[in-house]
Amino acid sequence: MTSNHIFKALVNWNLSEGETTKTSRGFSRNHSVKITNKADLKVSAAKAFHGDEACYNPEDLLLSALVSCHMMSYLYVCAQHKIEVLAYSDEAEAVLEVESSGKGSFKSVVLNPVVRIKDASQKELALRLHEKANKLCFIANSCNFPISHRAEVVF
């Protein structure tokens, strides 16, 4: 059985948004994204694309969605296997390739999760569960680029 869930976002841009209304490319990239009952996101292009580096950019948000979704999927499968996770961190990295035409896409993401578990005897299972988490992750399942894991388990 399948079920559908609807997510909505509202983007707002105007010429006066942000401190700079004109750039070398003729328009500000600063805008806001609104999601009902949540804090607004201030978004711009990445600095490399003439954006405001103080704002989130779509590339940041895609990577953060991926690492967050993987972590939640991982915590879920660990709970299923009675692995007590005490801490989780991940310093992930994405590679974006941009052609001379301006067309670009992500080519790969490497997740580097460091997971602290309570029971050292569960280390091997805890490492293997990253693959299962990747298969469950909604965001990973929506990506058309490889996602690899360099996981570490500590006690």
Image (cartoon, rainbow, N blue to C red):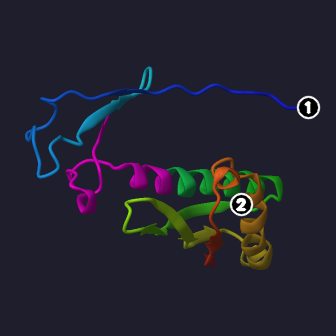
> Residue 4, position in %: x, y?
74, 27
- How many numbered marks does the figure carry? 2
> Residue 26, position in %: x, y?
14, 44
Q: Quadrant of the C terminus?
A: bottom right
Query: Which numbered circle lies on residue 155?
Result: none
- Element type at mark 1: loop
Q: Residue furthest top?
A: 36
- Quick check: 100 above or below 41? below
Give the residue number, with chain letter if any, for mark 1: 1
Within-10-Å neighbours for mark 2: few <14, some 14–19, many 20+ = many
Is residue 40 one of those drawn in magenta?
Answer: no
Give the residue number, with chain letter if any, for mark 2: 134
For the magenta stretch, what is the residue range?
Answer: 41-64
**Rendered residue at 80%/58% (across/down):** 82
Is residue 57 one of those drawn in magenta?
Answer: yes
The residue nearer to you, when weighing 110 against 130, is 110
Q: CA distance from mark 2 to mark 1?
A: 21 Å
Marks 2 and 1 in Cβ contact (< 8 Å)? no
Within-10-Å neighbours for mark 1: few <14, some 14–19, many 20+ = few
